[in-house]
Every structure is written in structure tokens, then in C-alpha cells.
Image: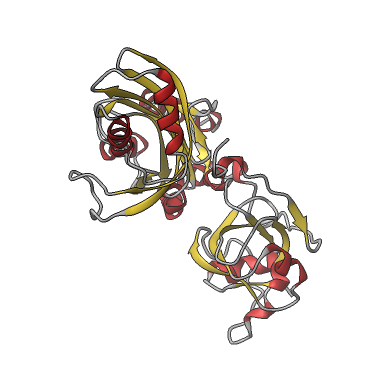
Amino acid sequence: MPKTTPPWEIKRELLTKAEDYTNPKYGCKPRERPADQYIKYGTINLDKPAGPTSHEVAAWTKKILKLQTIGHGGTLDPKVTGVLPITLEEATKMVQALLYSGKEYVCVLKLHGDVAEPQIRHVLCLFEDEIYQRPPLRSSVKRQLRTRRIYYIDYIEHEGRNVLFKVGCEGGTYIRKLCYDIGEILGVGGHMQELRRTRAGPFQESNANSVTLHDVAYWFGEYERTKNPVNLYRFIEPLETALVQLPRIIVRDSAVDALCHGASLTAPGVLQVDTGIEKGSVVAIFTLKGEAVALGRAQVSTQEIMDMRHGAVAVLARVLMPRNVYPRVWKTGVGSDEQGK
């Protein structure tokens, strides 16, 4: 069993603090956005091919879709394939939520000597914990010692000196360095031979919405030819899809525009809240229609949110929704606890 539960396996329950009604005149469900807005607030579960860099793949996607801004959730080396989340236009605001989400890889480790299977299995298990890593010389970050969490390493098989295994880990883990360290502990040395990312947060290679660059080009071409938004749904998901691993707070319509102007979320504006929130947790704030409003940092726990009548629940880190989608019902100069009243 893993020493730490992967983020995608954490189970939460949505608790109801208060009841309210959402006005259909304002906002809309994410999958009902007009086509231009659907693209602007969209993400793509892209299967990166071997050869190009992550930045090149993102640039090609940007050119195909004729967009101004695009981002991606976690760099893959040119030879590495697999899940590369792409964020479109306004969705790039939440790309940090993807960079630090959990990742999963399937890796071929090439050992430099012969090792028996029981010994390989034993050493792999030793790394299921918090480990120390120093980024390699050719990395884009400062080379200082840091810790990363390995949720699990599952031995699959080995043939000769090639070892196939699956690893679930915290974002920012260097699998190449992990392979080197495993080889050192085995006493024969080793290096990463092949690597494929099978998961990046909520995005998986097995998802029905996983697409290639060819799919993106084809279905966008079909959309431009027919103007049928169904062709967009074949390869674009709403940005809200990328936030499903974060604990949620659902707010009243009357609190939304204040949040879009940067106000902290206060207790009167909260309708529902996920279990498992602790002080300092990153939370995703949603409307009753399921639209993402902002990312925030919880100031109190779930139970405290349920019990509170006044005071700050979360401080915003990133606003995702534009202003004036919902009506302004707050007044300048009035205390923040007036949200949602």
C-alpha cells in the first residue's frame, strides 16, 4: 500500500451549509458556453508525441486554434510521450493548479548489471515515501536540494536488464534522477531508457477526451467548416475539468461579482463546502451552475466554515471568471461580510 494517498484517490463529500437559488439570466453551465467562450475557457488532454518539446507542441496547438495565449501543465522532455494538459486563453490562469498536481508515469529503467527480481521489487518499495532530489544539470529550475513525494511504485516486469514499472508521484519529480538513484541502491547503476506520462492530475491517457495533435487539427477544421460546436466538444473540455481534484466551495450568485473584483470569500456567501479542507488548503470556488470563479487559500477548516456566520473563509489567489458575468450587489466601502446578504 502507498504511504501517501495520491491526490486523485482522495474522497470528499460536499456538505450543505445553506440553500439558495441561481438565476438563469446570469452565467451558464460550463458545457453550455457559446463556442467562442467554450474555446477561451477550455483545456485539452493532449497526448504528446516523441520528438518535439512541450513548448513546441503548445505553440503548434496555438497556431492551429488561432489563439493569442496558451499554456501547458508540466514540461515533458522531447523523447517523452503522454499526457500534456493544454490550457487555452483564459484557462491559462489556473495552470499552476496543474503544475503541482500529482503525476503518473510508466518507465523503462535500464540497469547496468544483472539483478534478481526480488531485489528489484524490494528497492522500488524503498522509494515509496518522501525523497530528496536535486534537479539535473540540464533543468530549467534552480539546482537546490528539495523533497518530492512518491505515492507508489508498482513493479510490472523485467527482461534482462530492462525493468518496467509505474510510478505515481508529486509534480516536479524527476524520473530520470529517480532511475539513477534506484540503480545506485541496487549497486549496478542504471538510467532511464523510456518514459511515458499516463496521468497529470485529473487528465489521464485512458480518458475518452485524450487526443493527438492530428485530432485537434481535424476537429477544429470541422468546426470552422460547419460551425457545429459538437466538433469542439470532441477535443476541448471546460477549464473546470482541471480543478476536480481540488476541494470545492460553492457560493451564492450574490457573492460572485465581489469575488471577481478580488474580495475575500466570507461566510455568508458560502452554500456548500467539501470535507477535508484545512487552513492553508488550496480551494476552488464555484457557482451553483458549476462555473469556476476563483482559486483561493482556505483560512479555516471545513468544520469551521460550516459553523461560521461571519468572517473570511478564503483569500483569493487567482480570479478565473471575468467581472460583470453576475450582477453587482455589493457596495464599495461596505465590509466584506456583506457578501451574499
Q: Please state the horizontal and vertical placement of residue 85, each as a whole percent of the image.
A: 42, 39
Front one among 61 and 221: 61
* Residue at screen point 65% across, 47% down: 29
Vertical placement of 284 versus 156: above or below?
A: below
Viewer-side residue, 147 vs 258: 147
Most distant residue in the left direction: 137
Foreground of the two, 14 or 285: 14
Above or below, 171 against 157 in this view is: below
Q: Compared with residue 34, is residue 260 higher up or lower down, i.e. above or below? A: below
In this orientation, which residue lies closer to the viewer: 56 or 35? 56
**Quadrant containing the C terminus in the rendered view:** bottom right
Quarter the N terminus occupies:
top right
Is 115 placed above or below 167 here? above
> Residue 247's quadrant in the figure?
bottom right
Residue farthest toward the right in the current orientation of the protein: 19
> Where in the figure is residue 177, as x and y percent of width and height?
29, 39
Q: Residue at x 64, y 59 (%)?
A: 277
Query: On the image, which quarter does residue 105 sit in?
Result: top left
337 on left or right of 322: right
What residue occupies the far bottom of the structure in this picture?
333
